Amino acid sequence: MERAREEKLHNTQNVNVELPVTVKDLLEAGVHFGHKRRRWNPKMKPFIFTERNKIHIIDLRKTIELLQIAYAKVRDVSSKGGKILFVCTKKQGKDGVKQEAERAGVFYMVERWPGGTLTNFDNIRPRAEYMKELERMKEDGT
């Protein structure tokens, strides 16, 4: 499965879009600092450049490659009238993500939400509807 995923990435590396950020910008912003070694996910191995002081250092060249792919995809989806959702629940990124999403006129989510909200909505929806019904019953006393 991992091999198939990497092949998919290689097939899309021909995407050549100019990004509004450079490796230098990412480095200055501290984007290269990853998690402590004890918290890492092995699926991140292809994106780890090295390790310093038990902290993983992210490969910013790969970050730029993947940002180009994401940028091209967002451009493609939005040009066809599709919906874009910016998501960031990390304290240090919330304000910037919210500001840029509002500037771009797209949806955003900067607070924590219940697990499965995006990935398992078919099962979440009935519970959300039930919650709305309970709130309505509470308001009107039924």
Image (cartoon, grey):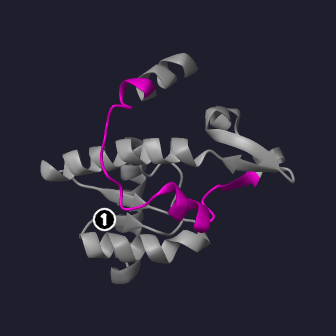
- The crowding category of the residue bearing disc 1, from other C-alpha atoms within 10 Å (few below 14, some 14 to 19, many at least 20), is few
Residue 57: x and y in percent read: 71, 49
Toward the right, the furthest residue is: 53
| In magenta stretch: residue 17 | yes
Q: Which residues are magenta?
A: 10-35
The relative height of residue 40 versus residue 28 in the rendered view (above or below) is above
32 relative position to 23: left or right: right
Residue visible at 31% across and 41% down in the picture: 16
Residue 71 or residue 42, whichever sits in front: 71
* Residue nearest the viewer, comparing 99 with 16: 16
Q: Is residue 36 above or below residue 108?
A: above
- At a point 37% along the width and 24% down the height, the residue shown is 11
Q: Secondary structure at mark 1?
A: strand
The three-letter code of the residue at mark 1 reads: Phe
Report the side of 10 relative to 104 (left or right). right
**Residue hosting label 1:** 107
